[in-house]
Image (tube, rainbow, N blue to C red):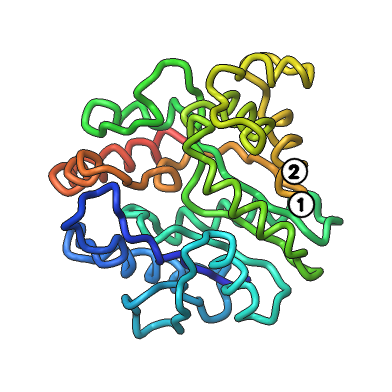
Amino acid sequence: MYGIILAGGRGERLGSNQIPKPAISIHGKTTLETVVDAFCGSRSVERSVAIVSREYQNPKVPSLPASPYFGESVKAGVNFFGGRGDFVLAYADCPFIASSAIDPFLDDATMIRRNEDQLLVIPVVRRKAFQPLLDIYPYHFYSSRETDWAHGTIFYLRAREAIPETVYRNINLFFEKKSLMYGWKDLGKTTAGLLCCLNLRTALSVTKLALSSRGLSSKPTLQECSTILSAFFQIPTVLHPIDDIRLGIEFDRPEQLRAIQEHYDHFMEAIEKNEHAS
């Protein structure tokens, strides 16, 4: 298993004076250090981790220059390891990530569709797992009662055959157009956006129409969403439900970062309660 940390984000939404995300310090460690330590401590990640970053590096792992496009950064990391293999990808802004969270997910992910030579597994965290944090974290995915899931901060990519260029291009398109798709605020709206974001300026007014045109309800199942994502990315894609909130906490906005920095101990307490509950 190869590890790729996507650490090229500048964090523009955090404010013009904000230092890049990989260099932000939370509880005495930069976010990049936290993710590197989690990967280095993982029993699943057996080879060196490629850091896809700009100027912020870590001496424990090799570093590659970042691309402004998400898919291109993924490709750079995959190609660093020869273009084939099993990969775990993580954002650099995962302040609570740990090897004890990564390994169980990878245990599950590597068993999914074992006969497939190419596969993308995206963890989705159940809303109930976040309940202990809702009072202290202004997490925009959970500001609405509509949503039941949030996407995780790590991914599993199986590339035992070379990944076609179209896959990386579609990953780029997804992240470029995500703002037109309600982000991940609701998986139903996200999948609807995937159906029409390339042809329309906004998917918001046609959400139900886009879903119904495929025979889907306004809140499609994870299996239905996985089918649409597979068609969009042009690689088999599985949304895998989990309850580990460490794999769902990131930050994009100033109020989220402040909440994490100011209430770090409360977050850790909520995470520990979540572990005991599961």
The percent coordinates of residue 199 (x first, y second) are 66, 34
Q: Nearer the viewer, residue 252 or 207?
A: 207
Q: Nearer the viewer, residue 38 or 155?
A: 155
Mark 2, other Cα within 10 Å: few <14 / some 14–19 / many ≥20: some
Q: Quadrant where the N terminus lies?
A: bottom right
Q: Residue at x 25, y 67 (%)?
A: 23
First along the sequence among labels 1 and 2 = 2
| Horizontal side of residue 177 vs 245, given as left or right | right
Q: Are the residues flagged by discs 1 and 2 in contact, CB closer than 8 Å? A: yes
* Occupied quadrant, residue 61: bottom left
**Looking at the image, residue 197 lies above or below residue 41:** above
* Occupied quadrant, residue 89: bottom right
Q: What residue occupies the far right of the structure in this picture?
A: 115
Disc 1 residue type (three-letter): Ile
Q: Nearer the viewer, residue 208 or 146?
A: 208
- Which secondary structure, mark 2? helix
The percent coordinates of residue 224 (x first, y second) are 73, 28
Q: Which residue is mark 1?
A: 235
- Which secondary structure, mark 1? loop
Q: Residue at x 61, y 18 (%)?
A: 206
Q: Nearer the viewer, residue 104 or 226?
A: 226
The percent coordinates of residue 223 (x first, y second) are 72, 31
Disc 2 residue type (three-letter): Ser
Mark 1, other Cα within 10 Å: few <14 / some 14–19 / many ≥20: many
Q: Which residue is mark 2?
A: 230
**Looking at the image, residue 198 lies above or below residue 167:** above
User: How many numbered tags mark residues here?
Assistant: 2
